[in-house]
Image (tube, rainbow, N blue to C red):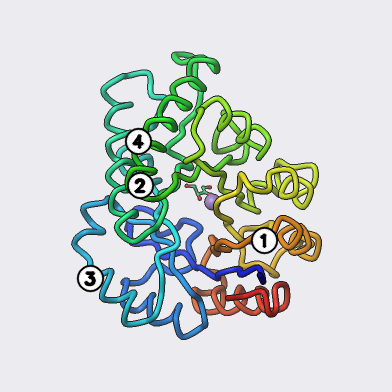
Amino acid sequence: MKNMIRAAVTVCLAEQARRGPFVFHQELPAACAAAAELGFDAIELFAPSAQHIRQLPLQHLLTQHGLKLAAVGTGAGMLIHQLSLCDADADRRQQAENFISELVEVGAEFQAPAIIGSMQGRWTEQVDRATAMSMLSGALHRIGSRAAKAGTVLLYEPLNRYETNLCNTLQQGRELLTACDTDSVRLLADLFHMNIEETSIAQALLDSGSSIGHLHFVDSNRHAAGLGHIDFAPVAKALRQIGWQGFASAEAFPLPDSHSAAKHTIQTYRQLFGNQLA
Ligand code: LER
Ligand code: MN
């Protein structure tokens, strides 16, 4: 069977993240129309909360534009409420877990996984590395089990060293997943973070293979793929070799503007993946 790569693009609905690395920052109807018109198969949502998503006419817009929901981000829990899964305070950790779990549930209604990126937090003077890692693996186990019950998976994203001191590479992510003792958590491979942390982006993708559940597709400078200096030919080859069938989701700054970033991304996908695109 031919490998199918599905093109997704990020849409940010959180006012507090309007300077963040998301392609579309406009209202959902306009973002869906633009994504579909450019040929994307799906959107990935960064929203202020699960409650916010429930109040949107999301199903209607997805159906109207023939789009899927690729994933939902949970980073608003950190950005708006400063919550994290390894906070020193047990109540705050529980609030973080609840915030994510609600997004897991709403995502699952659209067959979309939730992403744990910045909500993983960091180890600190109050919470040492070993304790933070065990808090994180416990939380991934519990939230992953919830995701499995809801019929989806949970995505865990290693981040570059300036954003977390827990897992920076896919291999560290794989070790964490082993410690979680669940197969309902998959890795999110973000090419921006990988460009900073991995020895070889392509080799890291090959080594992680079936542990990968989602891709953030972007260039070295967090501009649209093709506007920085990542060499994408070995990346595309590695994805072919691992038989990648999931989403390549553009998580890039809207530079020079949303429409150009989205258009440049889809053109790069067509060059790289050709008839492998869904
Ligand atoms: C943050 O840098 C990032 O890549 C997001 O996908 C994680 O929330
Ligand atoms: Mn990312």
Specify few, some or many for label 1: CA neighbours under 10 Å numbering under 14, 14-19, or 20 or more.
many
Q: Is residue 227 above or below residue 192?
A: below
Foreground pick, 147 / 250: 147
* Furthest residue in direction bottom, as rendered: 37
Residue at screen point 66% across, 70% down: 1
Q: Residue at x 70, y 70 (%)?
A: 226
The answer to which of marks 2 and 1 sits earlier in the sequence is 2
**Mark 2–mark 3 distance (CA, rounded to whole Å):** 20 Å
User: Which dot, 2 or 3, sits closer to the camera?
Assistant: 3
Q: Which residue is mark 4?
A: 82
Quarter that holds the C terminus: bottom right
The reply to whether dot 2 and dot 4 touch (C-beta < 8 Å) is no
Tell me the CA gap for discs 2 and 4: 8 Å
Residue 170 placement, left or right of 73: right
The three-letter code of the residue at mark 3 reads Pro
Q: Of marks 3 and 1, which one's residue comes earlier in the chain? A: 3
The kind of secondary structure element at disc 3 is: loop
Residue that carries the numbered disc 3 in the rendered image = 57
- Of labels 2 and 3, earlier in sequence is 3
Which amino acid type corresponds to the residue marked 1 in the rendered image?
Asp
Tell me where residue 240 appears, x and y as whole percent.
73, 63
Residue 136 position within the rendered picture, expressed as x and y whole percent measured from the top left: 46, 27
Q: Which residue is mark 1?
A: 219
